[in-house]
């Protein structure tokens, strides 16, 4: 019984770890000054409410949305986007997007893996706004 | 690649020291020791190399933005380690070259990669009004190097300096890219240059062996 509990605990921890640190795509911007990349990344969020936009970190507030067609069996999705903009070297800036995601299922919220579509959309917006 | 002053800075003389740029397997950590490869590539991915997983790299040059030879010169420079195929559309392309309207930079490259060290897309934008001008040096070739995994800038006066330097592909840059494509994506690389010392009991002799330079 104890082993089962331990295994379940590790399983939950592993699932959370995957969600937070899984295969997050990274974007490198070469040949632009950091300040310009940072400005473009902030601009990409337009009027969206941000809880933080300082020290190389942009965080949105938690936003709920309807599930996409491929997100079956859930009633709502809530996402909080974090973008890290790091100067790696002279005119080399790394942007990492992570999305904390929860799904409403059976009346309760649970942590799920981030939607690749959301991550893709954020990266595309950032790329488009950096110029 | 930044636009540099048209008057050019004269007299810049920087020596490239390549003697200690070894590629060596550290059996205690499993990491390949290669300081330049770490500095100009793997450090962007927690010490794991980042490259295109499959060759040839498919390149789309939008509207005559560049000549194929400006990109494929990296095949020669790396002794065939990196190869390219030029495609007629964005669909299926790995690297896309296009124009942008900026006038304060010669070009910019966006590269995306995953945790496993696979480049997943690259997009290069060159500034149409200036990238062929005297203020820019071989912009397409410079950006191509970024797009295939040279993820930094040198300070040796050559092409991969932030301003393109004298436009020459230095042995350091060619070596980094050649090494990169002789290793699988995601190979753990250590930044230390390995030196092994042997001390004779009771003696003062200290012999140092620096392990091999790239193939």
Image (cartoon, grey):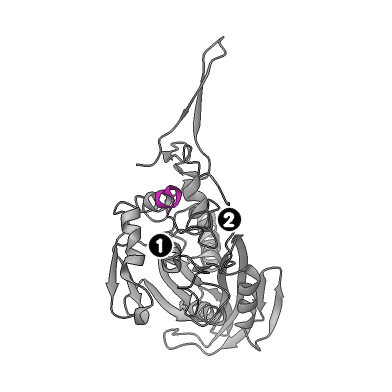
Check the image and report above or below for B141 versus A2: below
Please tell me whether mark 1 sits on a helix, a strand or a loop: helix
Count of labels in the image: 2
Residue under pointer 2: B10
* Residue at the image point whose x is 53% and y is 84% from the top: A106
Please tell me whether mark 2 sits on a helix, a strand or a loop: loop
**Residue B72 horizontal/vertical position (percent):** 32, 63
Q: Chain of mark 2?
A: B
* Residue at the image point whose x is 40% and y is 48% from the top: B175
Q: Main secondary structure of the magenta part?
A: helix
**Mark 1 crowdedness (10 Å alpha carbons): few <14, some 14-19, many ≥20:** many
Q: Which mark is residue B119?
A: none
Q: Which mark is residue B148?
A: 1
**Residue B146 horizontal/vertical position (percent):** 45, 63
**Mark 2 crowdedness (10 Å alpha carbons): few <14, some 14-19, many ≥20:** few
Give the residues drawn in magenta, as a range.
B169-175
In the image, residue B174 lies in the stretch drawn in magenta: yes
Image quarter (top left, top right, bottom left or bottom right) of the C terminus of chain B: top left
In the image, residue B101 lies in the stretch drawn in magenta: no
* The one of A98 and B123 positioned closer to us in this rendering: B123
* The one of B92 and A19 positioned closer to us in this rendering: B92
Q: CA distance from mark 2 to mark 1?
A: 30 Å
* Residue at the image point whose x is 63% and y is 82% from the top: A43
Check the image and report above or below for A68 versus B43: below
**Residue A69 horizontal/vertical position (percent):** 43, 88
**Residue A8 horizontal/vertical position (percent):** 52, 62
**Can residue A12 be seen at all in this image of the molecule?**
no
**Can residue B79 be seen at all in this image of the molecule?**
yes
């Amino acid at each position: 019984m104890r082993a089962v509990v331990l295994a379940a605990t590790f399983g939950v921890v592993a699932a959370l770890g995957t969600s937070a640190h899984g295969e997050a795509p990274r974007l490198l911007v070469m040949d632009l000054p950091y300040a310009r990349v940072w400005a473009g990344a902030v601009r990409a969020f337009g009027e969206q409410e941000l809880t933080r936009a300082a020290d190389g970190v942009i965080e949105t507030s938690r936003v709920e949305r309807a599930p996409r067609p491929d997100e079956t069996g859930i009633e709502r999705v809530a996402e909080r986007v974090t973008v890290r903009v790091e100067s790696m070297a002279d005119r080399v800036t790394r942007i990492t997007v992570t999305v904390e995601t929860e799904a409403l299922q059976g009346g309760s919220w649970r942590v799920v893996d981030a939607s690749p579509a959301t991550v893709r959309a954020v990266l595309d917006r950032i790329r488009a706004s950096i110029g | 690649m930044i636009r540099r002053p048209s008057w050019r800075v004269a007299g810049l003389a920087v020596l490239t020291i390549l003697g200690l740029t070894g590629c060596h397997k550290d059996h205690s950590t499993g990491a390949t020791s290669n300081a330049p490869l770490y500095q100009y590539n793997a450090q962007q991915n927690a010490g794991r190399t980042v490259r295109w997983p499959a060759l040839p790299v498919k390149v789309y040059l939008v509207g005559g933005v560049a000549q194929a030879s400006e990109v494929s010169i990296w095949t020669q420079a790396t002794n065939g380690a990196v190869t390219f195929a030029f495609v007629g559309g964005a669909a299926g392309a790995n690297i896309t070259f296009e124009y942008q309207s900026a006038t304060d930079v010669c070009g910019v490259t966006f590269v995306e990669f995953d945790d496993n060290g696979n480049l997943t897309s690259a997009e290069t934008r060159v500034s149409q009004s200036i990238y062929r001008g005297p203020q820019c040096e071989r912009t397409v070739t410079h950006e191509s190097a970024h797009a295939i995994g040279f993820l930094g800038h040198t300070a040796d006066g050559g092409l991969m300096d932030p301003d393109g330097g004298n436009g020459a592909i230095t042995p350091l840059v060619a070596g980094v890219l050649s090494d990169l494509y002789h290793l699988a994506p995601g190979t753990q690389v250590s930044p230390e240059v390995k030196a092994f010392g042997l001390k004779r009991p009771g003696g003062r002799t200290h012999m140092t062996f620096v392990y091999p330079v790239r193939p």
